[in-house]
Image: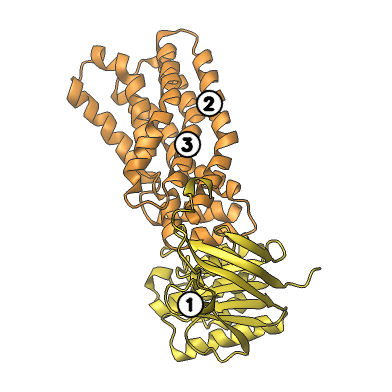
Amino acid sequence: MVEPLLKVVDLACARGGLTVLEGVSFEVASGSALVLRGPNGSGKTTLLRTLAELQPAVSGEIFAPEDTVAYAGHADGLKGTLSVGENLTFWGSLFGFGDIAPALDAFELRDLVARPAQSLSAGQKRRLGLARLLVTGRPVWLLDEPTVSLDVAAVGLFGRAVERHLAGGGIAVIATHIDLGIDADVLDLSGFRASAPQGGAFDEAFA
Amino acid sequence: MRGLLIRDLRLAIRAGGGFGLALAFFLIVVILVPFGVGPSANVLAPIAPGILWLGALLACLLSLDRIFATDFEDGSLEFLATAPVPLEGVVAVKALAHWLTTGLPLTLAAPVFGIFLNLPGGGYGWLVASLALGTPALSMIGAFGAALTVGLKRGGLLLSLLVLPLYIPTLIFGADTVRRGVEGLDAGTPLILMAGITFGTLALLPFAGAAALRVNLR
């Protein structure tokens, strides 16, 4: 078994055909977290999507063991007509993990388990979206603004879930503006802004 | 994978418009035709095979744009793409779920609609056989088209323009199977050709659909 470790060397990534980040290099060891900071448009989401292999890197390399990544974007991926339990059970079965009880407990969703997801409040939906990460059983969490619409108590729940995940040898890369109360390295992306937009050099047909 | 199929079927049933919508649309098309061309059996019987196949094809088209669009909008597709299941399999399962909610009920209900159009007696068996073998191709081609247009606003119209021409071979052989059955000719040849098209699409299009999804997720 390979230690889950995420290593990025001289990565450049693009959004909408324009290179927004270049020269990004970092390592995240098993059991630690990395917080991404930077103003709007600095490429936090782009970097996370590239790490999740949802989009190709312009250049540079990402080293991570195969099938270890769980990506939670801005959208929660919930189906309004399914209940909370059904939503979680579906993702659990897809990732071959099955047991949803720890995820329900971690985000205090047990009382809501039979409610259809469309009747949840924005914060409850977000908690359910984050609980998805726990049922994947994946060691590498990539989180994009995970605390949007969460109240202080829920942010605390989330912080503790991340801490338990790290204690279990997992890693987390989190793009956020607030302090989560967890021990993490900080990477400010404004230092990696691509020097000149390379509009003409990029051809979508051959990307 | 089975979880994905069960989820899609459950969503189709709960959201309404699953089994019922395509059937109701098929019913209305079939009922409108006699109003348009007149109720005379001499007029209806020769065109019944073509109308039944056209109706089934249009009914199939109705729910195509939802195959991937809802999953794309709510972020499920990104999560599916990082899940330990091949995206090719996701496309195939989505097409299967679409077929189970549209193609299969259409196939089973088609004989009843055949009566409305005075379809002569020899055609019924061939109608069911041709729809059973042909509608899977409609769902598979449709899933590919839906994967191509998934990120687009108003993609539904473009989807119809892309997919309908690809339905032509299935339509030709499907309607011809029923017509030959009605006339008492050998209907096996067009049926086999149509089955060939269906199996070809089932073998190839999951890969094309998955490639299109990967591009659209960027």
Residue of label 3:
B141
Dot 2: few (<14), some (14–19), or many (≥20) neighbours within 10 Å?
A: some
Residue of label 2:
B197
Q: Amino acid at mark 3?
A: Ile
- In the shown orientation, is residue B107 left or right of residue A32? left
2 and 3 marks in contact (CB < 8 Å): no
Residue positioned 25% across, 30% down in the render: B31
Chain drawn yellow in the picture: A
Q: Amino acid at mark 2?
A: Ile
In x, y percent, where is residue A139?
68, 72
Residue of label 1:
A145
Which chain is indicated by disc 3? B
Distance of label 1 from label 3 (alpha carbons):
37 Å
- In the shown orientation, is residue B40 left or right of residue A193? left
Q: Secondary structure at mark 3?
A: helix
Which chain is indicated by disc 1? A
Distance of label 2 from label 3 (alpha carbons):
11 Å
Closer to the camera: disc 1 or disc 3? 1
Colour assignment, chain B:
orange
- In the shown orientation, is residue A98 left or right of residue B206? right
